[in-house]
Amino acid sequence: MRIVLLCFAVLGGLSQLAPAATISAVLHPGPGSNKPGAGFLGVARQDFGAIADVGSGVGVPPSNGGVVGLIPEAFVSLDANTTAHVKADARRSDPNGTQNVGIYLTTYSYLRFINSNIVDINAEYKVINSGYWEFQVVGNYGWSITAQAPQFTGARRTYTFEKVNGTPIDLAFDNGGGSATTASGTLGTGTYRLSYSHVRDHALGGSAVNPTNPDGSTNLDIFFTFQSEDPSGVVPEPTSLAVFGLLGIGGAVAKWRRKK
């Protein structure tokens, strides 16, 4: 009897270790590349830029830590008169007293012309800022995406949101990238990706003159609203593992006592 009581006492302590609903968020370069930026002059491509290590892992925005530069500003020269630029800022908000999470991303993708009077209007200048958030989710959440319209003529920012573990599921997408969009739904425990591509393409229009806001930023924000813990057991819980361990110990002790 004392052994059974001891087992329940240990279980009571371990029950405090059962994981709560959680969300991790890491920014990666786009698939097929180890850099988040690429500049083009015709078919000639130059990859540039890097995802920053902000002290808690590469591309991980700190919880309630303010805005951080996850892609520090970088550029390459496309010709003697033209440079292509990318950067990205992000912050994560975990409101106190809730299990909600907000990830705010601002991307920048633009061209600079040193002398706008000698720009080759027939040249195919283009710059792409691309990457994806990878979310590891434990629990059940509502989600919503708010995508701002690009700030430049000649700019596009497309995105896709999908579940990638198990059977892949497309949850939302914007293949046009020229206007503001929103999307929402629900999700459970799993691995999810929010991929984006922010393009400034001179062939799509836009002035060769450096604008008053050369950064040309656009926002892509995603919000997770907590609904419930995960009851499926997809993530092993210390409590459930302890149950089987303690039952095994109790059975072994009981068998030993009968032999005595």
Image (cartoon, grey):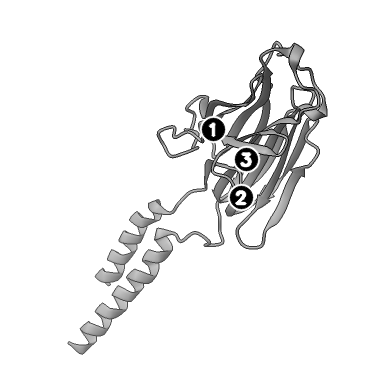
Can residue 116 be seen by looking at this rendering?
yes
Judge left or right: residue 99 versus residue 152.
Answer: left
The secondary structure type at the circle numbered 2 is strand
Q: In the rendered view, tell whether residue 12 sits above or below residue 95.
A: below
* Label 3 crowd (10 A; few <14 / some 14-19 / many >=20): some
The relative height of residue 11 versus residue 131 in the rendered view (above or below) is below
The residue drawn where x is 17% and y is 87% is 260
Say if 256 sits above or below 138 in the image: below
Q: Of the residues under marks 3 and 1, which one precedes in the sequence?
A: 1
In front: 206, or 238?
206
Q: How many marks?
A: 3
**Between disc 2 and disc 3, whose residue precedes?**
2
Separation (CA) of disc 3 from disc 1 = 33 Å
> To which residue does mark 3 refer?
225
244 and 149: which is toward the camera: 149
Q: Residues within 10 Å of mark 2 (few under 14, many from 20)?
A: many
| Left or right: 105 as drawn, with respect to 169 | left
Assess whether mark 1 and mark 3 are in contact (beta carbons under 8 angstroms).
Answer: no
**Which mark is in front, 3 or 1?**
1
Amino acid type indicated by mark 1: Gly
| Residue at mark 2 to residue at mark 3: CA–CA distance | 15 Å
Residue at 40 percent of width and 65 percent of height: 241
Give amino acid for label 3. Thr
Tell me the residue that label 1 is attached to. 49
Report the front residue among 117 and 150: 117
Q: Nearer the viewer, mark 1 or mark 2?
A: 1
Q: Secondary structure at mark 1?
A: loop
Q: With 165 as the anchor, is 115 left or right in this view?
A: right
Tag shown at residue 250? none
Label 2, on which residue? 192
